[in-house]
Amino acid sequence: MKPTIKINVLISKDLILFIIMSTLFSWINAQNIDYTKNGDYPTLTEKEAIVQFLDLGDSLVLAKNNEKAEIAYKKAHQLSKKAGDKELLITTGFKLEIFLFHNLRKDTEALEIINFLFKYCSKNEDSICLVKSYFRLSKLQKRQLQYNKALENIEMAQQLAKEIGNQGLIWESHYLKGDLFLTIDDWNMAKKEFLKLIDVVPEKSQEYYRTMTYINISSSYNNPDSILHYSQIAEKNCNGYSTKRECDLAYNNIAWAYVLKNMPQKALDIINNNINISSVKHSYEDSLYASLMHTLGIIHYKLGNYKKSIVYYKMSLEYDIKDNNIVEIMMTKEDMSRSYEKLGDFKSAIQLLKEVKLLDKKSDYINLKREVARLEVKKILDKKEEQIENLEQENQEISIAKSKTKIFSYFLGLFLILILSTVLYRGHQNRVRFHQLNEELSLSKMKSLRSMMNPHFLFNSFSTLQNYILKKKNKEANEYMTELSSLIRTVLASTESIYISLSEEIALLKSYLRIERERFDHKFEETFEIEQELLTEDPIIPSMIIQPYIENAIIHGFSHLDRKGILSIKFKQNKNAMTCIITDNGIGRLAAERFKKANNGSNHLSLATRNTNERLRILDRIANNSASVMIEDLVCESHKSNGTRVTITLPVKQRNK
């Protein structure tokens, strides 16, 4: 009962604050005081009025009255323009822009304020204000998925911060770069930027920056031991040096590390003993609240408290939706579906997965943007390093050339310009071609993924599940539903990248075959044969190339077979490529085509094959003729069809060691 009483008290305070501030705002309006015009002010100076409007805006935000808060902040900014006070003008400008950006998501108006600040700060030669303007612009561009532009503005801010020697701004520039790299899933670059924070911790508020430094470093790792190590370093500053919110971030990361270690009870103890959950508020500055609720949801799921886990997932989902974080929304709904599945509420579980599927297009677009951004950012950084090396070399050449005649210097300079222009032009052409091929490959892969999860496949799978349920085969139904859910989650997760490890691809194929084997009542059986070298190396291969041909063998080869189907799948090493040989003892392509025409069959499989062939064509252009597919009809001695053999050759990439 105590937590309930505490919450009611908090609500009452907010209500009282709202009534007081609303009354104050109404009184100010009733006085007809317009501080944006010339004239005498009855009781307040211009500066006092600006401060009063700012305080009023802050109070109205706390009272969740954004409409009136916007009016107050805008009046403060308008009045500061008239007053001509530089410090107040910059303060009200950033205050208004941050409010428009985070609370109202009015990006266009926020951009207008940023542009005004750029002009004003440039005119007044205020470098600190310019750096902060670059930071705000980069955050707006990041939300609009303009990752490369955001990176360019952070780089500009960082260079200016280094010129004026402001350690706090230098620290923030490295943090923003690391956060941007995390957003586009470039974990290695994020790690490098966050590790740089250690060397630029400002002396002022040192403990705060040190705590946040190690919290950020821990967030750039997937390894639970590394997360735990750096989060515990951050925790050491929580003995009176750091604020409660910073420490809550550290303890949440520690709890998450124990979740990854499959120690849910330990994770729950960390949260219960160190974080006052009722006092944690949602903030635009970090995702602590949503992250903490999600962490608690997963902890209770692992502890078997499925109803509790759903409560926390819903609390996390509320703020994920508020922040329009599509990736987190999909992840939370997938996790929630697993809890419903454990409770036997398959209807709710399937509904959530359907909602996730509806977000696929947005997610695909975001993932494609991130994929392209990762490639472009890498090119930009590589080019930057190359330019630095070239500039150093050119400086040496120029210093030598100055000691010679002017004619020779002019000739050499002209020659270098021509060469550089040619190299840049050719490089630009190659980059355009490379990005076009990658975009084509990404879109083709997404089509292949959607074709695998086609309505026909899902309908048949759910029909098989329904059959188990009607026959009261509860164990078989549960196992089949678990397998199907796992396959769907794996397929959805595989949209993150064009490539996948061989072991993950084989696991996906085996999961798919188990579902199809149940669906066809064990009418066929399969064997896998994988060379030991491939198992050891576990190379990276293009994903979802093999599955359509296996599906063809099952649907077309075994559907009308009067004997048990045998499917053989072999993986062989082939220099810098891998060969997959799929052999079946089905009815053959000619007979399958006749049945298809007689039954007016769906063209889904032919569409899936066309998508796959298109991806192979693009891979063939990228990997220098190392991607190919060959289909053979097998016949016995009496010249009757004895099945089909498909030989697929794919390029491989070795893992970084």
Image (cartoon, rainbow, N blue to C red):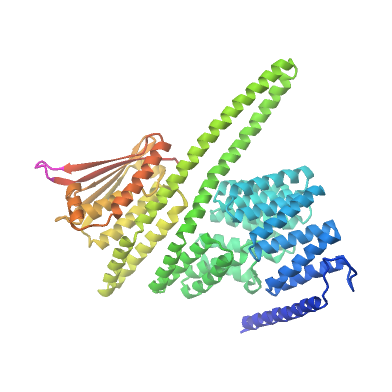
- Residue 79 lies in the magenta stretch: no
Q: Which residues are magenta?
A: 635-640
Residue 13 appears in the figure: yes
| Quadrant of res 239 | bottom right
Residue 652 appears at what percent x and percent y?
40, 40
Q: Is residue 548 above or below residue 467?
A: above
Q: How many labels sit on residues?
A: 0
- Quick check: 540 left or right of 161? left
Residue under the point 34% across and 38% down: 573
**In this view, which residue lies farthest toward the left?**
638
- Quick check: 461 left or right of 118? left
- Quick check: 53 left or right of 329? right
Residue 426 appears at what percent x and percent y?
53, 31
Using the image as rendered, state which of residue 24 and residue 225 is in the foreground: 24
- Quick check: 626 left or right of 597? right
Q: Is residue 48 above or below residue 183?
A: below
- Residue 637 lies in the magenta stretch: yes
Magenta segment main secondary structure = loop
Using the image as rendered, state which of residue 40 and residue 153 is in the foreground: 40
Residue 236 appears at what percent x and percent y?
69, 59
Residue under the point 89% across and 68% down: 39
